[in-house]
Amino acid sequence: MALKGKVALVTGSTSGIGLGIARALAAAGADVMLNGFGDAAAIEALRAGLAAEFSVRVLYDGADLSKPDQVAGIVAKTEAQLGRLDILVNNAGIQFVAPVDEFPEAKWEAIIAINLSAVFYGMKYAIPGMKARKWGRIINIASAHGLVASPNKVAYVAAKHGVVGATKVAAIEVANDGITVNAICPGWVLTPLVQKQLDDRAKENGTDVETEKKKLLEEKQPMLKFSTPEHLGAMVVFLASDAAETITGTPLSMDGGWVAQ
Ligand code: NAD
């Protein structure tokens, strides 16, 4: 129970990677504020299940992270209802795929708001409390696309490169306040976000999802294996541990060799 007594906020934790991270933090003893969209009854079952399984406090807030005042709101609610905010995991994210000259403006705005601006606002509102307590961990879920590009993902790649840059700036600013700020840069993780891309590709290419899974990995990763939400959860728990207290300002790749090429 390495994180007993710590409080974590994981944005976008009703699904995929965020859920894996919230689970790993709860298993390590942290109290957790969940966030994200989805069916209310399913989210409540998830919240109550995590609290019961790991004997920690688990709350949920449905803040829409595309709205800066709602990012401020969920940070304030975490501090008010769970007593503090020690570990902020900025994870919520969306994707849309189209060439630059056909990319819908509303999709650009939404991806920049959720994948980039919400990370800035989360850090802005969480850092004062962390500074006052002289301890904090901020972990931003970027992507291999925070380090290299792929076609048809202009907003996503721009946002994720921005997340890596913002991570470095925050890290050096708070380097002597007991706070570390890092980014994790996953390659392919099989979540609903990637499943949609697989379904679309299978439809477009007249193939099936299994064929597209193999092609997706072969295109980018020397290691032909998906990372899992559990891998990401374990990395976040490590970054929140005392052993990681001098790791800061770093984009940590978990990508099967994607950006090593
Ligand atoms: P997902 O679609 O499974 O989960 C996204 C989560 O974000 C959900 O809980 C959703 O409800 C929430 N969300 C979306 N819009 C929101 C909003 N406006 N306000 C609050 N919550 C919102 O996706 P995922 O694959 O688990 O992605 C999680 C993060 O990991 C994203 O930032 C994504 O860019 C990043 N990532 C994913 C992969 C991958 O291969 N899946 C690879 C690299 C990086």
Image: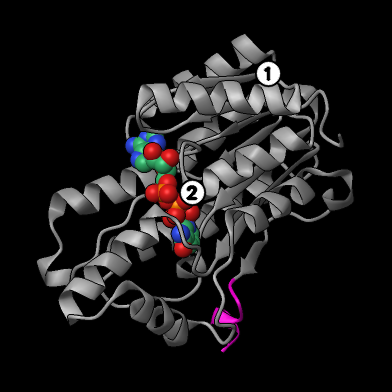
Judge whether 247 appears above or below 12 on screen.
below
**Which secondary structure lies at badge 1?**
loop
Q: Is residue 119 magenta?
A: no
Mark nearer the N terminus (1 vs 2): 2
Assign the C terminus to one quadrant of the image.
bottom right
For residue 176, which quarter of the picture? top right
- The yes-or-no answer for disc 2 within 8 Å of ligand 1 is yes
Q: Nearer the viewer, residue 39 or 165?
A: 39
Please, what is the three-letter code of the amino acid marked with disc 2? Gly
Give the residue at the far top of this rendering: 80
Assign the N terminus to one quadrant of the image.
top right
Q: How is the image coloured?
A: one colour
Q: Nearer the viewer, residue 136 or 38?
A: 38
Residue at the image point whose x is 55% and y is 82% from the top: 224
- The yes-or-no answer for disc 1 within 8 Å of ligand 1 is no
For residue 260, which quarter of the picture? bottom right
The residues bearing labels 1 and 2 have C-alpha atoms spaced at a distance of 21 Å
Residue at the image point whose x is 66% and y is 22% from the top: 51
Question: What range of the chain is rendered magenta?
Answer: 255-261
- Circle 2 packing at 10 Å, graded few (<14), some (14-19), many (20+), is some
Residue at the image point whose x is 83% and y is 27% from the top: 4
Residue 249 makes an appearance in the image: yes
Residue bearing mark 1: 57
For residue 238, side relative to residue 216 (left or right)? right
Q: Is residue 260 magenta?
A: yes
Please, what is the three-letter code of the amino acid marked with disc 1? Arg
Residue bearing mark 2: 16
Q: Position of residue 133 (x, y in %)?
A: 78, 23
**Which secondary structure lies at badge 2?**
helix
Residue 137 makes an appearance in the image: no
Q: Nearer the viewer, residue 96 or 14?
A: 14
Residue at the image point whose x is 60% and y is 29% from the top: 126
